[in-house]
Image (cartoon, rainbow, N blue to C red):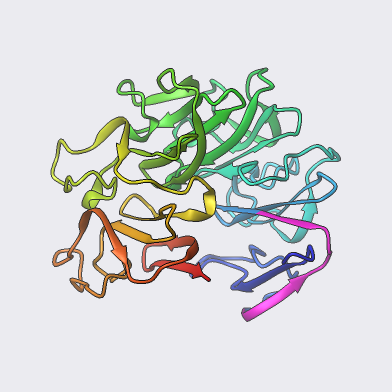
Amino acid sequence: KIDGTLWVSGSPKEDGAGGMQGMTGKNNTTQYSSPTQLPGVTWTGVIHKSHRTLLATKTDGTLWSWGDNAQGMLGLNEKGLPPSNQKARSSPTQIGTDTNWKIEQGGISGGQEQLLAIKQDGTLWTWGKNDNNGMGNSQPSNYRRSSPTQIGTDTTWAQINAGGGGYCQMAIKTNGSLWSWGNGIGLGQNAPHSRNSPLQVGTDTTWANLVAVGGGNVFATKTDGTLWSWGSNSYGSLGHNQSQPSGNDISSPKQVPGTWKTDYQSFGCLGDSSTAGIKTDGTLWTWGDNHVGQLAVNQSGGSAAASVPRSSPTQVPGTNWLAVGGFSSSTAKTFAAIRK
C-alpha cells in the first residue's frame, strides 16, 4: 500500500508440492483468503515471484527474499539443492547487507530458476541456476550460485524483465539500448537463438520500457510512444494481424499499430498466448488466445481447439482505463484492470 505496508493472500505452497515453501511469508501453514499484512512499513512495493521464490525491496535499499530455495534462489548463500523446499524461508529474510539495491520498477526480475537484480550503481547481479542461459554470466547450464554474482562489469543497466519459463531475459541500459540473453526466438536477435551473455538487440537507443515479457515473446515501448513486439506468435499474440501457423513467429522487433502508453502498468501478458494494453486515449485493447474468455470481448470458444483468437488488438468496452495486469498458469488465465 502507499503507506509502505505489504499484504499477501493465498497458499504458502504450490498445490501438490511437498514440504513447507513459505510463499506467503507469514511463517505458518495457513491459507489466507483475504489480504493479510506482513511485518514492516517500509516496503517499496517492488516485488517479484519466480519459481515459488519471492523478492522485495525496502525504502532503505535492502533486498529481501522468502519462499522456496531450490537452486539457492533465495540468495542467502545456501545451496538449496533438491528436495526443492530445502532451507526454505517462511518469512522475509535479508539478502546480504547491501543497501543499494534498485527499488524502482524494473529493478528485480527472474526466469525459471534464476533471479536478477540491479543495484543503484547500475551494476547487474544474478543467482540461482543457469537454466536456458538465463543467468547471463557466460557459464554452462549446470552452473549454480546461491548468492548474488555480478554479470560483467557494466554500470549502465537501467531495467530488466525476464520471460516466463526462463527462456529470454531482456534489459535496457541508461543510453536507451536494448539487450537480451537466454534461449528462444524472444531474444529478438534474428539468429542465433541462444546467448549466455548480454547481446544488444539492433542499434536503436530509444527504448523506454520492457512492458511485458511472456514465455516466448516480448513487448517494449520506445520514447516516441510506439509499441513493439517479437518472438512466439501463438494465437496471434504479437498483435500483427497474423495467426499462429508456422512462419508467423517474428525474430526481431516489429511495431504494433496504434499509439500506446509507455509505462509498465499499461500492459499485461499471459505467457506467450494473450496480451492486453492501454492506448494514450485511455482505451483498453486485447489480443491473442481467447479460449477461456480472457480477452474480455464477450466471446469464448470454450476450449483451446474451439478458441476465437484475435491476432490484432480488439477494444474492450469502456474508457479511462488506468492499469492492466495478468496471471497465467496451467489452469488459469486471467486479466484484471483498473479504470477511473
Please tell me whether residue 324 is drawn above or below residue 29 in the rendered image: above
* Farthest bottom residue in view: 33
Quick check: can you spot residue 30? Answer: no
Residue 191 placed where, x, y %? 31, 21
Specify start and end residues of the magenta stretch as a single range. Answer: 32-46
Q: How far across and down, in percent of the image, does residue 313 sit?
A: 28, 54
**Residue visible at 61% across and 42% down in the picture:** 106
Could you tell me which residue is drawn at 63 percent across and 81 percent down?
34
The structure residue drawn at horizontal position 48% and vertical position 54%, both measured from the top left corner, is 266
Say whether residue 22 is visible: yes
In this rendering, position of residue 96 left or right of residue 12:
right
Q: Is 264 on the left or on the right of 20, as rendered?
A: left
Q: In x, y percent, where is residue 288?
A: 26, 55
Location of the N terminus by quadrant is: bottom right
Q: Main secondary structure of the magenta part?
A: strand
Residue in the image at 34% along x and 49% along y: 272
Decide: is 291 above or below 156.
Answer: below
What is the quadrant of residue 143 in the picture? top right
Would residue 265 appear left or right of 250 to someone viewing this image? right
